[in-house]
Image: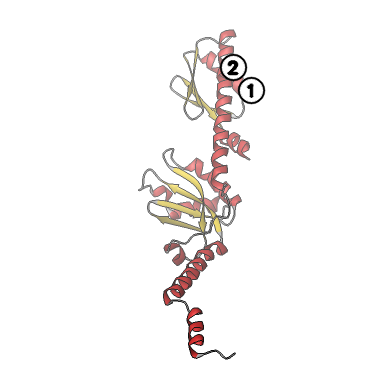
């Protein structure tokens, strides 16, 4: 049976979509493609520094670059933007070594955090496209939990240390005042050099991972950097 011109026209109309639908489809494909490109390029580990003193010339890009090179740590690039300094590395091993080094160099009010930066072209980043997180990204969470566990462990060690110093004070060392401080530190004060010497001797024998720093009436105890790094490794 031969189709009439009217039937052929109706069939053409049924197979035709509105122009705006094609525009939406093409736009969606372009956006999804642009969103996927940063994921293809991937990310690199980095460290982000925020300085309490924004005029800190001792931590300029040149100084940081020289500091890392002196300690045989390779950095791909160092970026200063919006009051923050980002150091990008080619691997997590260099990232960890740099963090341990910078922890010693920074002031206590400065901030240092692990992060990851996209290595996609800058124009994609400026447009707001970043790597898609495939599943649950635990990298920052693991670091956070690790820091919590480290702090908790040293708090318990600090409390045990205080108990032992107090016990030795009751038994043979007199005139010693012991107090827990923030940041897992302990202050030990006494007017007796003999008592302070006895406590120091006890600490060297039983807690070699803790170091003492002299104060006006005694000394301050805190876990050594090596002790902390060994616990984290």
Q: Position of residue 154 (x, y in %)?
A: 57, 29
Using the image, tell me which numbered label, if any, was put on residue 137: none
Decide: few, some or many residues near mark 2? Use Cα within 10 Å; few <14, some 14-19, many ≥20: some
Depth order, front residue of 55/32 = 32
Q: Position of residue 177 (x, y in %)?
A: 49, 15
Mark in front: 2 vs 1? 2
Residue contact at pointers 2 and 1, CB within 8 angstroms: yes
Residue 209's place in the image compared with 77, above or below, is: above
Give the residue displayed 56% in from the left and 36% down from the top. 225
Give the residue displayed 42% in from the left and 63% down from the top. 126
Q: Which residue bears the numbered disc 2?
A: 164
Q: Earlier in the sequence, mark 2 or mark 1?
A: 2
Give the residue displayed 59% in from the left and 36% down from the top. 226
Q: Position of residue 26 (x, y in %)?
A: 47, 73
| Disc 1, SS | helix
Q: Which residue bears the numbered disc 1?
A: 206
Which residue is the extreme one toward the front? 1
**Quarter occupied by the N terminus:** bottom right
């Amino acid at each position: 049976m031969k189709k009439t011109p009217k039937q052929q026209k109706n069939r053409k109309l049924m197979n035709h979509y509105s122009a705006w639908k094609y525009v939406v489809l093409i736009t969606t494909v372009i956006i999804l493609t642009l969103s996927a490109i940063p994921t293809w390029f991937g990310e690199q580990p980095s460290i982000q520094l925020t300085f309490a003193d924004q005029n800190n010339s001792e931590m300029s890009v040149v100084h940081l670059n020289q500091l890392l090179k002196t300690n045989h740590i390779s950095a791909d690039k160092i970026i200063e933007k919006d009051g923050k300094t980002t150091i990008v590395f080619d691997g997590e091993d260099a990232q960890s070594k740099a963090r341990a080094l910078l922890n010693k160099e920074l002031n206590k009010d400065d901030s240092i955090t692990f992060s990851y930066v996209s290595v996609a072209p800058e124009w994609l980043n400026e447009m707001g496209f970043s790597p898609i997180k495939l599943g649950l990204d635990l990298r920052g969470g693991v670091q956070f939990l690790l820091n919590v566990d480290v702090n908790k462990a040293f708090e318990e060690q600090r409390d045990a240390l205080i108990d032992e110093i107090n016990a030795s004070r009751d038994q043979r060392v007199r005139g010693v005042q012991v107090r827990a401080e923030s940041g897992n530190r302990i202050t030990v004060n006494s007017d007796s050099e003999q008592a302070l010497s006895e406590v120091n001797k006890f600490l060297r024998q039983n807690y070699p991972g803790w170091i003492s720093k002299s104060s006006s009436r005694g000394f301050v105890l805190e876990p050594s950097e090596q002790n902390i790094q060994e616990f984290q490794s």
